[in-house]
Image: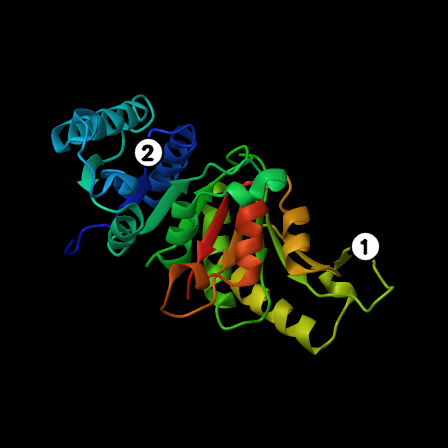
Amino acid sequence: MGGQQRPVTVGVDGGPATAAAIRWGVAEARTRRAPLRLVHVYGRPAAMDGWDVPVAYGPYALAAAAGEVLADALARTAGRAEDLSVSGATIEGERVPTLLMESARADLMVVGTRGLGRLTGAVLGSVSSAVAAAACCPVIVVRGRAGYPEGHVVVGIDGGEESDRVLEYAFDHASRYGLPLRAVWCRRPPPGRLREPVPAGDCRDRATTSMLDAVASWQDKYPDVPVERVIRPSHAVDGLLEEGLQASLIVVGARGGLGHPGFLLGSVSQGVLHHATSPVAVVRP
């Protein structure tokens, strides 16, 4: 894309989650001052390979149907994105590899999901999960109520190598939207000693001090962002899900190297992604 601003790319499929994904994409493109790109990936169902293809699944019919999906998605930006450069594309191919190629030239990917929240988290779409696991850029998976606009941003940190990148993303997002940020450090309590969350300043061991220092350095760079630092005596997934109730966005890191997409997300990011009731941003190293 040369020296042009990388776009915010939204994967659209015509499903019920598409509208929420587009709303997020428009807002992100506007606050980032970036172009908005809508992409619909289509293809013949794999189950039909090797069979005589009905006319409804022929190449021309599929291309026409894909064009209708994209046209509907573009129409949903009407009245919302006049100040943005908006483009769209239909691409024939497999969804996950195609969206991953799109992510290589995007500033951010936004995808929806069929998941309906914590009680039905197992139905998180395989496409959303795979894209979040292996994309070349941060990915927002829009789910639940598509976020609470006046809520807070939750960021999970653990002192790992990717913490700085995750914190940078969370602070930048909170600053762009004028939202408070809650930095959450989760640690399992000793058996039989479950406690309520405590302010970070009330618990000062070496690990906690390291967390405080990491957050403080980004707070200095984003003085406009109100920050609350919380230590939760619980498993990281449970703690982040609880802190993320009625959040605008939950930000998590993703550990792992190259390989099959299903193995690229760590257990914490997988758990949060599958069970959160708010949108989740996955930030890869």
Residue at horizontal 63 percent and vertical 53 percent from the top: 240
264 above or below 247?
below
How far from the left and from the top, in percent, is residue 173?
46, 48
Circle 1 SS class: loop
Q: Nearer the viewer, residue 197 or 13?
A: 13
Residue 271 located left or right of residue 6: right
Residue at horizontal 30 percent and vertical 43 percent from the top: 9
Query: How far, Cα to Cα, is label 1 from label 2?
Result: 42 Å
Residue 59 located left or right of residue 48: left
257 above or below 171?
below
Identify the residue position indicated by label 2 in the image: 13
Circle 2 SS class: loop
Q: Image quarter for residue 52? A: top left
Mark toward the start of the polypeptide (1 vs 2): 2
Residue 139 located left or right of residue 150: left
Q: Amino acid at mark 2?
A: Asp
Q: Amino acid at mark 1?
A: Glu
Q: Are marks 1 and 2 in contact (CB under 8 Å)?
A: no
Crowd tier of the residue under label 2, counting other residues whose Cα lies within 10 Å: few below 14, some 14–19, many 20 or above: some
Q: Please tell me the numbered disc located at residue 45.
A: none
55 above or below 209?
above
How far from the left and from the top, in percent, is residue 151?
59, 38
Crowd tier of the residue under label 1, counting other residues whose Cα lies within 10 Å: few below 14, some 14–19, many 20 or above: few
How far from the left and from the top, in percent, is residue 84?
26, 34
Q: Quadrant of the C terminus?
A: bottom left
250 above or below 255?
above
Q: Nearer the viewer, residue 201 or 197?
A: 197
Q: Please tell me the numbered disc located at residue 196.
A: 1
Taking the view exactly as shown, the residue that stands out farthest to the bottom is: 206
Camera-nearest label, 1 or 2: 2
